[in-house]
């Protein structure tokens, strides 16, 4: 997934690597450092889906938890919400 200035890749084992701008915490870690090379985010596991936006990332875990990282238009966020998928 590609945001405005950061990227996330979902690996086959359900972990992610991130790189680019992390000024708003969009990598999902507690460090606000940028990286030119991919960084394994070992604390984030069992990832099923990823998406990126402008200074923000959304990661859905295999158990259905939706995790938001980074910045919205009005404030920074780092929160978790449980969602229940419905049939499509």
Image: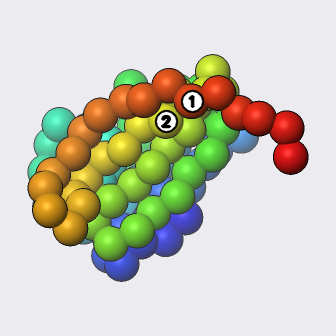
* The disc label shown at residue 83, or none: 1
Q: Is residue 70 above or below residue 35?
A: above
Looking at the picture, tell me which residue is in the foreground, 80 or 34.
80
Q: Residue at x 49, y 71 (%)?
A: 2
Disc 2 versus disc 1: nearer the observer: 1
Instruction: Name the image quarter holding the N terminus.
Output: bottom right
Residue at the far bottom: name it.
4
Q: Residue at x 32, y 59 (%)?
A: 56
Residue 85 vs residue 30: left or right? right
CB within 8 Å, label 2 to label 1:
yes
Please report whichever mark, 2 or 1, sits nearer to the chain's N-terminal start.
Answer: 2
**Residue 14 placed where, x, y %?**
63, 33
* The disc label shown at residue 66, or none: 2
* The disc label shown at residue 23, or none: none
Residue at the far top: name it.
63
**Residue 88 placed where, x, y %?**
86, 46
Residue at the far right: name it.
88
Residue 24 vs residue 38: left or right? left
Residue 79 vs residue 9: left or right? left
Q: Is residue 71 above or below residue 5?
A: above
**Residue 51 placed where, x, y %?**
52, 58
Q: Is residue 47 above or below residue 16?
A: above
* SS at badge 2: strand
- Regarding residue 17, the answer to whether it shows in the image is yes
């Amino acid at each position: 997934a590609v945001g405005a200035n950061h990227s996330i890749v979902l690996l086959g084992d359900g972990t992610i690597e991130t790189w680019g701008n992390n000024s708003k915490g969009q990598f999902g870690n507690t460090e606000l450092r940028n990286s030119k090379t991919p960084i394994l985010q070992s604390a984030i596991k069992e990832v099923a889906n990823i998406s990126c936006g402008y200074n923000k990332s959304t990661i859905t875990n295999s158990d259905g938890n939706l995790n938001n990282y980074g910045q919205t238009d009005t404030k920074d966020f780092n929160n978790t919400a449980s969602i229940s998928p419905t049939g499509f």
